[in-house]
Image: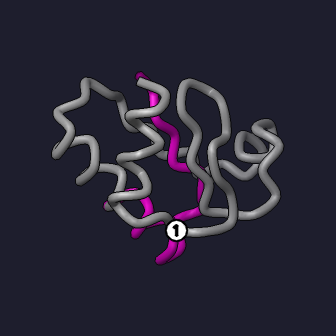
Amino acid sequence: MKIGILGTGCPKCKKLAQNVEEAVKELKIDAEILKVANINEIMNYGVMMTPALAIDGEVKLAGKVLGKEEIKRILLSVG
């Protein structure tokens, strides 16, 4: 599974990345976490608001920071 954190490095983007890393660790999921900071790459996903979360190339959320439990639910639903 490839998980993309789309954002330019703002505090909200960093918090989403931290929450994703913790959720992956707790669920013991084999996942590659990618941080996408290039604005052109982010726009290629169709994202206009960051932070955003993409799983296997599909955007699951944009414009807000999810908590760890919400992220776990998303990961379990796609895994």
Q: Residue at x 66, y 31 (%)?
A: 58
Question: Measured from the top left, where is residue 34 in percent x and y?
Answer: 44, 38
Q: Residue at x 46, y 32 (%)?
A: 77
34 on left or right of 52: left
Write down the quadrant of residue 16 in the picture: bottom left
Q: Measured along the vertical axis of the image, is residue 37 above or below residue 75?
A: below
Inspect the image, locate mark 1, and give the three-letter code of the amino acid beneath it. Val
Given the current orientation, which residue lies at the most extreme bottom position?
A: 11
Q: Residue at x 78, y 50 (%)?
A: 47
2 on left or right of 30: right
Is residue 26 shown in magenta? no
Q: Residue at x 41, y 46 (%)?
A: 73
Q: Measured along the vertical axis of the image, is residue 62 above or below residue 13?
A: above
Q: Measured along the vertical axis of the image, is residue 16 above or below residue 34?
A: below
In depth, the one of 19 and 32 nearer the eye is: 19
**Badge 1 is on which residue?**
65
Q: Quadrant of the N terminus?
A: top left
Is residue 4 shown in magenta? yes
In depth, the one of 28 and 77 nearer the eye is: 77
Question: Measured from the top left, where is residue 64 in percent x and y?
Answer: 61, 68
In depth, the one of 71 and 32 nearer the eye is: 71
Residues packed near mark 1 inside 10 Å, few (<14), some (14 to 19) or many (20 plus): many
Write down the quadrant of residue 55 in the picture: top right
Write down the quadrant of residue 46 in the picture: top right
Magenta stretch: give its range. Answer: 1-18
